[in-house]
Amino acid sequence: MSVQNMNGTKVKPAKETLPEVEVESNGNGHKMYSYEMLEEIANFLLTKTNIRPIIGIICGSGMGSYWKDGSLADTITDAERIPYEEIPNFPTSTVEGHHGQLVFGRLGEVPVVAMQGRFHYYEGYPLWKCCLPIRVMKLLGVKTLMATNAAGGLNPSYKIGDLMIVTDHINLMGFAGNNPLQGPNDERFGPRFPPMNKAYNYEYRKIAKKVAKELKLDNIIREGIYTCLGGPNFETVAELRMLKMVGVDAVGMSTVHEVITARHCDMKVFGLSLITNECITNYEVEAEANHEEVLDVGKMRQDLLREYISRLVHEFSKV
Ligand SMILES: O=P(O)(O)O[C@H]1O[C@H](CO)[C@@H](O)[C@H]1O
Ligand code: HPA
């Protein structure tokens, strides 16, 4: 369901969130959920489905979340859909293009769970809460996280509709002291000081390039560095010029903290960005970034993404 804002743009109406239960504070005034509470969420989900997923997929904006017919999450067979509202203590999606449900099922033979809708910092969720589903996935038995996103292409050679295999990220929000792992560390998830130099699995990246070749996607497949800004505004020209200087290829408002959380609890990670718009680094350009374009490009690429990601899931399950 959507409503129009003053500019005629479609937006999701605000939903009431479930009451937040305080278990411990992360020292930043944020409340966090304990291991036991996350286990309760996982156990609740396990009573709702017989699927035992080994791969978790996060559908980026417009990539299986919004365009319901033919989208990635709709390709899943034996699907059981669980709306976020029905999951105790789960956040809810407030962004257009993020449907707000978990889809359990199979892609080919592989048991998966897909998040049709992720949580963003700009929605008002602290980073640990944006990443809560990753820890729940871990407790469900998921071994691999496939984090997809819509992103602006900063690398001048990128075109709208390109797919970027994420080789690495720059955690800009972390530079500013905001990290999903802030606060007391629970060793049952992972170590206090997790390494991050192998964040995006090398083997998966090789497979992703091989599969792209087989599907004749050579002309649209890229490899590059992603960064996440807090959003919700798109970037200024000066900000983008700065990011370009430090080696960023694609810019978004998600993924980085999810990947950090997944690596912390020893999940293997694959990251894929759909380049939905060109980052504007020139004051003379008339165009402005907008979310509608982001969703439109997701729709344009939905068939291709469905095929590519299904193939990747199959290949990754063999590693
Ligand atoms: O990262 P995903 O969720 O794909 O969405 C991207 O697209 C939205 C902006 O259009 C932002 O939410 C940005 O993060
Ligand atoms: O240009 C962008 N900037 C930030 N986030 C985005 N998500 C899609 N496109 C963009």
Image (cartoon, rainbow, N blue to C red):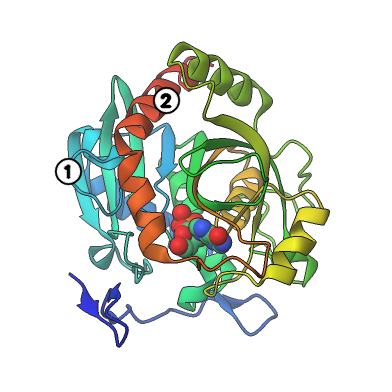
Marks 2 and 1: which is nearer the front? 1
- Please identify the quarter of the rendering in which residue 107 is found: top left
For the residue pair 68 and 27, the one nearer the viewer reads as: 68
Alpha-carbon span between mark 2 and mark 1? 20 Å
Q: Is mark 2 within 8 Å of ligand 1?
A: no
124 sits left or right of 250 in the view: left
Picture residue at 43% right of the left edge, 55% below the top: 39
Q: Residue furthest right?
A: 245
Question: Relative to 68, is 108 above or below?
Answer: above
For the residue pair 234 and 127, the one nearer the viewer reads as: 234
For the residue pair 304 and 36, the one nearer the viewer reads as: 304
In this orientation, does residue 116 appear?
A: no
Q: Percent from the top left, x then y, of residue 271?
A: 56, 39
In the picture of the structure, the residue carrying the numbered disc 2 is 313
Q: Percent from the top left, x then y, of residue 149?
A: 48, 49
> Which three-letter amino acid code belongs to the residue tagged 2?
Val
**How many C-alpha atoms fall within 10 Å of the one at disc 2: few (<14), some, or many (≥20)?**
many
Q: Residue furthest front?
A: 284
Q: Secondary structure at mark 1?
A: loop
Q: Percent from the top left, x then y, of residue 315?
A: 46, 17
For the residue pair 66 and 104, the one nearer the viewer reads as: 66
In the picture of the structure, the residue carrying the numbered disc 1 is 69
Q: Percent from the top left, x then y, of residue 176?
A: 77, 72
